[in-house]
Image (cartoon, helix red, strand yellow):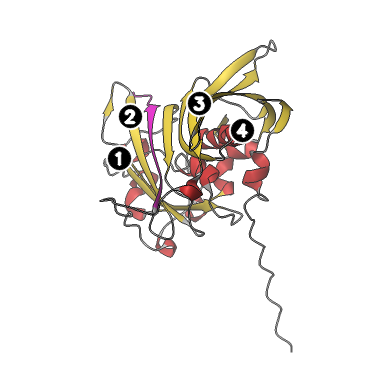
Amino acid sequence: MPEAASAPTAPRAVIGDSEFDRDTALTLREPGVYDIDLSAGWTIISAVNGGYLLAVLGRALADALPHGDPFTISAHYLTASQPGPAVVRTDVVRTGRTLSTGQASLFQYDEQGREVERIRVLASYGDLGALPDDVRTTAEPPAIPPMDHCFGPEDGPAPVDGSSAIADRLMLKLDPSTLGWALGQPSGKGEMRAWFGLADGRDADPLSLLLAVDALPPTAFEIGISGWVPTVELTVHIRCRPAPGPLRVSITTRNLAGGFLEEDAEVWDSADRLVAQSRQLARVRLG
């Protein structure tokens, strides 16, 4: 009897032709103004993920500015975004030889058809490929167990509270030492670490790094707080183009006070390079 043929392996998506690229693609309406239909595939509960939104605005600015790579981008989240039509308006603030600065806002419409601003960003762009190779750092990659010793949403007996459509679009493997919250035994340390990638195999680029810094479960879970932790402000620094392969993301919180906490994230690539850093302020509903 001939051996059964093995199941074909699904082809890996490539940068420029993946679900992430399609769902962050914008249509130019007029100079500096773009239309987009925000995908329901990147939602947490009913709200669109902040990292996905940042990637949408990041792509708009990459088109509007003479430089294509985000170096630093700061976003203020004004109201929760919903899946559906949105418009992005960009403005070129300054252009220079090595850096260009712009701002952008994303708007949706309320029940009366009035525009509501959801998120506003200010960003500086440049050319990551033109940066010098000199690196002087004391930073070290996070110690995360091998991927096959980590756990994702698919490893649980039931969906994790707060998980949603975005989980199906990510390759997320969490460090077991930061998973106490999922077992009802949070560590209290305010740490979250994971291997990260896109589920369709697309390698990371500067725009997907904007998603990576905001894609893990909130560190508030390991502090013993459940529920929605909405982002108030998020600043991301992109340090270099990531090498192919999975990323490692480490997020820590040191201070929760007055109903707000910070999350400091580092993203490392397969070549052990620190490719992105971020800090966000998030609101916590206590009680």
Q: Real-space Cα distance between discs 2 and 3? A: 21 Å
Q: Is residue 134 left or right of residue 95?
A: left
Mark 3 crowd level (few <14, some 14–19, many ≥20, 10 Å Cα): many
- Circle 4 residue: 60
* Residue 109 x/y as whole percent: 66, 17
Q: In the picture, residue 235 is in which quadrant?
A: top left
CB within 8 Å, label 3 to label 4:
no
Observer-side mark, 4 or 1, equals 4
- Disc 4 from disc 1: Cα separation: 33 Å
The Cα–Cα distance between marks 1 and 3, rounded to whole angstroms, is 27 Å
Mark closer to the observer (4, 2): 4
- Residue 157: in sight, yes or no? no
Q: Residue at x 66, y 40 (%)?
A: 23
Q: Give me the disc on residue 121.
A: 3
Query: Is 134 in front, or is 217?
Result: 134
Picture coordinates of residue 67 (x, y %)? 56, 38
Q: Residues within 10 Å of mark 4 (few under 14, many from 20)?
A: many
What's the amino acid at mark 4? Ala
Mark 3 or mark 4: name the one nearer the start of the chain.
4
- Local crowd at mark 2 within 10 Å, few (<14), some, or many (≥20)? many
- Which one is in front in this view, the residue at disc 1 or the one at disc 3? 3
C-beta proximity under 8 Å, tags 2 and 1: yes
In the rendered structure, find residue 190 and report the number of the disc placed on it: 1
Residue 89 appears in the rendering: yes
**Image quarter of the C terminus:** top left
Q: Which residue is mark 2?
A: 261
- Foreground pick, 204 / 159: 204
